[in-house]
Amino acid sequence: MSSTKSDDLNNLIASKLMNIEGEIPSYSESVADAFEILKTLHSQGWFWRVDSVHDGVICTLQNRDRKTFSIRAPTAAQAICECAVKTIEETPT
């Protein structure tokens, strides 16, 4: 993933989901940082699943209303980030 796309993902998640200002974690590159996203989403009523597939990883997020998003990406961190962005973009606040 290009550093610009990675930075954009990290910035969007930090500001819209994690409410972080200042130094932004490398959510899209660090699986430990990405799992903080899953922890936050879980506290907001989202259930998650991360699956290994032959050419990458699939992250699935589902809320209590059964709204479901699934994203495949080359790495777990990237799949988690891209799926989390779907929850930000497509779920009313």
Image (spheres, rainbow, N blue to C red):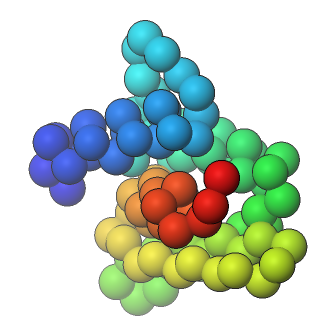
Residue 47, above or below 30: below
Is 1 in front, or is 66? 66
52 left or right of 10? right
21 left or right of 32? left
Query: Residue 46 placed where, x, y %?
Result: 77, 63
Query: Residue 51 placed where, x, y %?
Result: 59, 78
Is 39 in front, or is 93? 93
41 left or right of 37? right
For the question of whether residue 26 can be seen, the reply is yes
Which residue is pictured at 16% across the width and 41% down the height? 3
9 left or right of 77? left
Residue 70, above or below 38: below
Residue found at the very far front of the displayed protein: 92
Query: Residue 25 placed where, x, y %?
Result: 45, 27
Which residue is pictured at 71% across the width and 52% down the height? 41
Is 68 in front, or is 34? 68
Residue 11, above or below 23: below
Query: Residue 18 placed where, x, y %?
Result: 59, 34
Residue found at the very far top of the displayed protein: 22
How many numbered circles does the render carry? 0
Which residue is pictured at 48% across the width and 16% down the height? 21
Which quadrant holds the N terminus? bottom left
For the question of whether residue 76 can be seen, the reply is no
Residue found at the very far bottom of the displayed protein: 54
Which residue is pictured at 47% across the width and 61% down the height? 89
